[in-house]
Image (cartoon, helix red, strand yellow):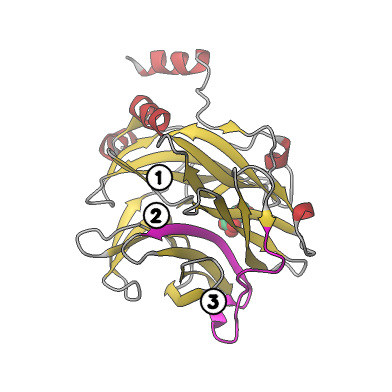
Amino acid sequence: MSSTTLLAKAATEKYETLFHRHPANPILTGKDWPYSINSVFNAGATLLPDGSTLLLCRVEDRRGLSHLCVARSVNGVDRWQIDREPTLLPNAERYPEELWGIEDPRITYVPELKKYAIAYTSYSRGGPGVSLALTEDFRSFERIGVIMPPDDKDAALLPRRINGYWALIHRPMTPLGAHVWISYSPDLRHWGSHKLMLEARRGAWWDANKIGMSPPPIETSRGWLMIYHGVRRTPSSSIYRLGLALFDLQQPEKCLVRGDSWMFAPEAEYERHGDVQDVVFPCGYTIASDGDTINLYYGAADSSIALAHGSIRALLNWLDANGHSEHSNDRRHA
Ligand code: BMA
């Protein structure tokens, strides 16, 4: 098909909706909190052994500093039981990297350790870095400390070792841009073998210059499926939208296919307006018992938590229809 025909096709066809917003959105706001806060957003998510949903929410207080607080719900939609006090507070005395708060947790259950690994942003004078903590019950936490120095964020641990090594996806800032990298470790403490995983595009693209992994990747039979955010800078602000890419199961730095357009963007009023306008920012999901339905929990406009449902099969089909290998993208860029 010629590029003109392709453009005409894109203009006349409606875009497929991959994620459906829950009618109860936003499902959690500062008003629901048992103590006084500014806002709640960007929550990590996991299913507990009893089938209930746990959100580890980023809560911003009225100094502007963030901590983490657990909310639990039987159906993952409403009747949230929120911890009466902050669940995990920054501890700047022992961990100076947490001086200005802890943010944006991503949860991975690690069967080998029988523990949940939480990768979060620790923020201090040095800038944002990546810290790691382990927990069995989301009541007591074992901090490992900073594992990626500033400026770095948007990190998650893969649930199992790859060729004998733990793998961490993260987003260091470099003078060449904000791209997604993967690093390996024998013990969760010492990290190396850093590899570039996904590059921000350039120029007019929706994901130009700055991207980052959003929730931890979804393991599918075809590869690690990554929902990532792309930041489009505009003269007045930035727009945070979501795209998709698929990576090799055994060699996760190898991108198999990447979607061209974004597949979810701020549209609803609670996504467009808030403390930071035009932001959808998922840090976690749960998968329903059918093995296909994905419940995506996302921060909306840095002010509330919202929920959208999708299908993993539909996401993969969309990538087949709308994606390209990075190799062919390179050729097109050239
Ligand atoms: C990113 C992160 C997120 C935030 C987003 C929009 O850089 O700091 O925590 O939701 O910006 O403000």
Q: Give whichever of 5, 277 is nearer the camera.
A: 277
- Residue 12 lies, with reference to residue 294, above or below; the image says above
Q: Is residue 216 visible?
A: yes
Q: Nearer the viewer, mark 2 or mark 1?
A: 1
Decide if ligand 1 comes within 8 Å of the CB at mark 3.
no
Which residues lie in the magenta part? 82-110
Question: Marks 1/3: CA distance?
Answer: 28 Å
For label 1, the crowd category at 10 Å Cα-Cα, with few meaning under 14, some 14 to 19 and many 20 or more, is: many
Q: Can you tell which mark lies on residue 226?
A: 1
- Say which residue label 2 marks: 180
Residue at the spot 66% in from the left edge and 66% down from the top edge: 66
For label 2, the crowd category at 10 Å Cα-Cα, with few meaning under 14, some 14 to 19 and many 20 or more, is: many
Q: Position of residue 12 (x, y in %)?
A: 51, 12
- Residue 86 lies, with reference to residue 177, above or below; the image says below
Q: Position of residue 197 (x, y in %)?
A: 33, 52
- Say which residue label 3 marks: 126
Q: Quadrant of residue 333?
A: top left
Question: Marks 2/1: CA distance?
Answer: 11 Å
Q: Give whichever of 205, 47 is nearer the camera.
A: 47
Q: Are marks 2 and 1 in contact (CB under 8 Å)?
A: yes
Q: Quadrant of ligand 1?
A: bottom right
